[in-house]
Amino acid sequence: MTENMTSQETAGLEAEAAEAEGLETAESAATQEELDVLEALRDVVDPELGINVVDLGLVYGVTLDGERNAAIDMTLTSAACPLTDVIEDQAREALDGVVPDFRINWVWLPPWGPEKITDDGREQLRALGFNL
């Protein structure tokens, strides 16, 4: 039966398994195209910290519609952060050629916290002198 499953069905089962194990990250439930968007978003750097938005844990999810346009659920370290335009401009450059179009849905729940930073992000912050 698994031989006849589509890649999206397989990704859906993998996402369910990851969720059941408590592994809810943007990458754990993503299709290959969504992973490509996440990889491109690693070129988007938080201007204040100098670390990419994926490794900082600011990207909560990516979905693609039928035309491959991306909807990106993203947060910031603070709702008062004035840098949304800078991040959107960087995302536009990073996603050029990856998807036809995108939009960022700025979300504030759940609130961002340092526990959302990936291991790579923690290493990068340590290299900059942050103690995590």
Image (cartoon, grey):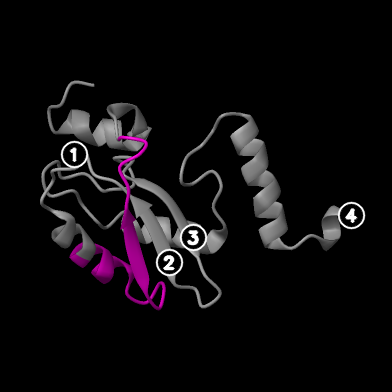
Q: Mark 2 or mark 4, which is nearer the start of the sequence? A: 4
In this view, the mark in front (1 or 2): 1
Q: Residue at x 45, y 61 (%)?
A: 36
Q: Position of residue 10 (x, y in %)?
A: 71, 53
Q: First in sequence: mark 3 or mark 1?
A: 3
In 3D space, how far apart are the residues under numbered discs 4 and 3 (Cα atoms)? Answer: 27 Å
The residue under label 4 is 1
Answer yes or no: do the residues labelled 2 and 3 have beta carbons within 8 Å? Answer: yes
| Whole-percent x, y for residue 72 in the image | 38, 58
Q: Residues within 10 Å of mark 1 (few under 14, many from 20)?
A: few
Q: Does residue 17 belong to the magenta stretch? A: no
CA distance for labels 4 and 1: 47 Å
Decide: few, some or many residues near mark 3? Use Cα within 10 Å; few <14, some 14-19, many ≥20: some
Which residue position holds label 3? Answer: 63
| Residue drawn at 32 percent across, 34 percent down | 117
Q: Secondary structure at mark 2?
A: strand
